[in-house]
Amino acid sequence: MSQNPSPSGTRPRAGTVKHALQAHKWLYLMIIPGVIYMLVFSYLPMGGLVMAFQEFSPYNGDTMLGAFLHSPFAGLSVFKKFFTGPDFVRVLTNTLSISIANLIFYFPAPIILALFLNEIKNLAFKRVTQTMVYIPHFISMVIVAALTAQLFSTTDGLVYHWLVELFGRDHAPDIMSNPKLFVPMIVGQSMWKETGYGTIIFLAALSGVDTQLYEAAEVDGANRWQKMWHITLPAIRSTIVIMLILRVGTILNTGYEQIFLMQNSMNRGVSDVFDTYIYMKGVVNGNYSLATAAGMFKSVVSMIMVLGANKLAKMFGESGFY
């Protein structure tokens, strides 16, 4: 007669956490480095948000923890100082002008390029074209900034000399120092560098479109533009909406490195954004409380924008981000 298995030898019931860990233990082991990375670099630094509510100084204690514990509590006075300060409106205006320009001109660029690439029938030419438009993504922003300065330099810039021949020396635009041209320059750099790489996700979505839809459209007499408008675009609409929600959520993030590299004394009035403001106040001037308050403001606005954009997408019948 067979004996009943001992409790220690029983298999965990399906659907429990223990069963999932045993069934997929190697997959869970593989995600451990990613979890550790997120804990150390994403969640652990959130403890520093307490500086936004303190008159924080690293000299208030002998250790890092001691500086947090001995810095006096300031309540919302740091946020009041931030919102009523002379820089808030200017920094907010500059940040929104760049972000909205990117949303209008840069966001649709990968979609349009992906649609054009999808229409290329010669596979060899299509692969070469895709490779060429992907390359700028892998170029460092430092190199992009150096190329921009070299091409548009008023002394020996090749593009600037072309503009002089086209418009005349008195009317040739000085892109590097004209404040009115700073936003177009930043948007142009972003489009040149990231448009090609941004097509990857849209081309992946286009690969799932049923080819029978195109065949049926051809039978009905639809041309290529009509097929693109009535089949291709609706097929990737959900992907576009999700990417738009993510883009709206970063409306106050303009990218520190690019802006900082393109700043100079002539365009500083329009190039100071939240990212450079936080760097100057926190790292350069040592005002950690004010810099933390500005960063926290950015994060809260980003969360509200993501939730609002997702809610709006659902109201219009889209699946949304979650």
Image (cartoon, rainbow, N blue to C red):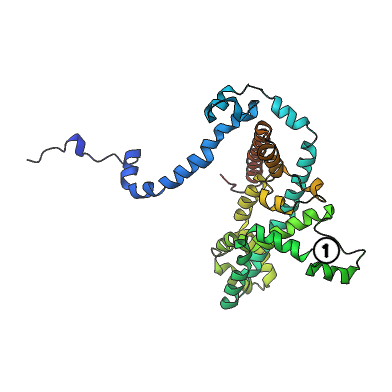
Q: Is residue 289 left or right of residue 268?
A: left
Q: Quick one: SS at disc 1? A: loop
Q: For the N terminus, give its image quadrant.
A: top left
Q: Is residue 215 above or below residue 251?
A: below
Task: Give how far across and how far down residue 117 sits, in percent.
Answer: 63, 69
In the image, taking residue 47 as reference, residue 31 lies left or right, namely left
Residue 317 is at least partly visible in this image: no
| Farthest left residue in view | 1
Residue visible at 37% across and 47% down in the picture: 29
**Residue 301 image offset from top left, x and y in percent:** 67, 38
Q: Quadrant of residue 87?
A: top right
**Vertical placement of 257 versus 73: above or below?**
below
Q: Residue at x 49, y 40 (%)?
A: 40
Q: Position of residue 211 (x, y in %)?
A: 55, 69
Q: Badge 1 is on which residue? A: 154
Q: Classify 10 Å Cα crowding around label 1: few (below 14), some (14-19), many (20 and above).
A: some
Residue 70, located in which quarter of the rendered image? top right
Closest to the observer: 136 or 257?
Answer: 257
- The answer to whether any part of residue 85 appears in the image is yes
240, above or below 293, in the image: below
Amino acid bearing label 1: Thr
Q: Position of residue 31 (x, y in %)?
A: 42, 47
Q: In percent of the image, x 59 and y 62: which residue is there?
A: 138
